[in-house]
């Protein structure tokens, strides 16, 4: 199989880019890309797309995430992780203050990304600007924290569980929690356990390198929260020819196994278990329901 996805359990100490280099070498192809960077110090689930599946990156990137993280209270670093320089110190909060503060960061919150990040500011990476001594002002943006729980408290460390929307920076979350509790902090450990419906088995050793490629089937599409249509062979041919979607899909029923889909503006189209296309709601023409977004045939 030369197209699909890999669930890679990234160990700490290597960048996401380095992980891709090993996978490319193993598979013998350069058509490999990940759908959500993990910092070098972090570990856990990295979803890697291979071959034609690379064209699906933006829909996989949209998935919500789950993490286990360890916050080091009392010291904030410039990178907000253990690899940075200490830039501020403050007293440790009490457990009660820390738990009370967590409640402030559940739901929709405004978050400023770290200066040391891959976000582009005026056409340049924020991290490159920060390393040159010109740390940019990082504008706050909305993110959603679905669940935030204190798992253990062993000062100066606190283990937390986070279920959040795409685009959330756990390093920023640790910083903001500490400041709200009257302290300072950085993230010293981070493990991504879930991306959408995908998860990393805790029993699996991080050192194991599993480059098994999974096909993008209906189960995978459900895992990223996207509904789908089923078409027959003739309808598949019409889609590959770019025929109007509304005529093809007018008597079709959208699969309802995905509830409260976060991708309610998109749907997949299958013939059997073969993914044919990704389509999107047509906001430009109210008379037409769907438009082509990506055809894989």
Image (cartoon, rainbow, N blue to C red):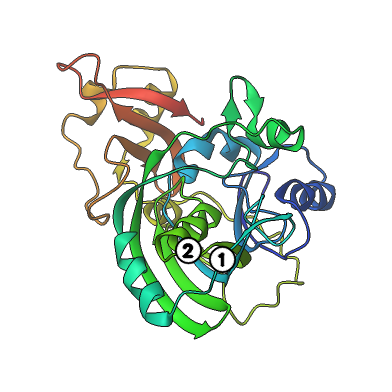
Residue 283, percent across and down?
24, 20
Q: In which quarter of the image is residue 154?
A: bottom right
Give the camera-side residue of 40 and 100: 100
In this view, the residue in front, 266 or 35, is 35
How crowded is the residue under tag 1: few (<14 C-alpha within 10 Å), some, or many (20+)?
some
- Residue at x 22% of width, y 23% of height: 246
Q: How many labels does the image show?
A: 2
Residue 188 vertical placement versus 240 (above, below):
below
Can residue 197 be seen? no
Q: Where is residue 150 in the image (x, y as percent from the top left)?
A: 42, 77
69 versus 144 height, above or below: below
Quarter location, residue 249: top left
Q: What residue would you read off at disc 2? A: 178
Q: Which residue is drawn at 35% across and 57% down?
A: 145
- Label of residue 215 in the image: none
With respect to residue 27, does 295 lie above or below? above
Circle 1 SS class: loop
Q: Considering only order in the chain, which callout, 2 or 1, is on the residue closer to the N terminus?
A: 1
Residue 109 location (% of width, % of height): 33, 49
Q: Residue at x 40, y 33 (%)?
A: 278
Left/right placement of residue 291 relative to residue 88 reads left
Coordinates of residue 230 in the picture (x, y in percent): 31, 42
Identity of the residue drawn at 61% across and 40% down: 115
Q: How crowded is mark 2: few (under 14 residues within 10 Å), some or many (20 or more)?
A: many
Residue ID for mark 1: 90
Tag 2, which secondary structure?
helix
Task: Find out whether the residues at labels 1 and 2 contact each other: C-beta distance under 8 Å.
Answer: yes
Q: Nearer the viewer, mark 1 or mark 2?
A: 1
Residue 199 falls left or right of residue 101: right
């Amino acid at each position: 199989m030369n197209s699909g996805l890999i669930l890679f359990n990234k160990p700490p100490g290597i960048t996401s880019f380095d992980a891709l280099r090993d996978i490319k070498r193993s598979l013998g192809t350069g058509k490999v890309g990940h759908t959500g960077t993990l910092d070098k110090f972090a570990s856990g689930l990295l979803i890697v797309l291979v071959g034609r599946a690379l064209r699906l990156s933006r829909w996989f990137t949209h998935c919500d995430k789950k993490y286990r993280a360890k916050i080091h209270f009392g010291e904030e670093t410039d990178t907000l992780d253990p690899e940075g320089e200490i830039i501020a110190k403050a007293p440790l909060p009490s457990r009660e203050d820390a738990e009370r503060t967590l409640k402030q960061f559940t739901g929709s919150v405004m978050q400023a990304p770290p200066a040391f990040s891959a976000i582009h500011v005026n056409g340049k990476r924020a991290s490159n600007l920060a390393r040159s001594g010109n740390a940019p002002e990082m504008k706050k943006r909305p993110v959603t924290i679905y669940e935030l729980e204190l798992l253990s408290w062993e000062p100066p460390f606190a283990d937390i569980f986070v279920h959040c929307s795409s685009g959330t920076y756990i390093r920023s979350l640790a910083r903001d929690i500490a400041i709200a509790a009257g302290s300072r902090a950085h993230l010293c450990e981070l493990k991504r356990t879930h991306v959408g419906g995908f998860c990393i088995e805790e029993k699996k050793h991080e050192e194991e390198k599993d480059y098994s490629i999974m096909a993008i089937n209906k189960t995978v599409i459900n895992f990223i929260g996207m509904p789908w249509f089923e078409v027959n062979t003739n309808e598949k041919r019409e889609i590959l020819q770019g025929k109007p979607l509304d005529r093809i899909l007018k008597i079709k029923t959208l699969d309802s196994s995905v509830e409260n889909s976060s991708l309610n503006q998109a749907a997949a189209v299958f013939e059997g278990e073969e993914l044919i296309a990704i389509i999107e709601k047509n906001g430009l023409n109210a008379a037409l329901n769907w438009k082509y977004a990506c055809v894989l045939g």
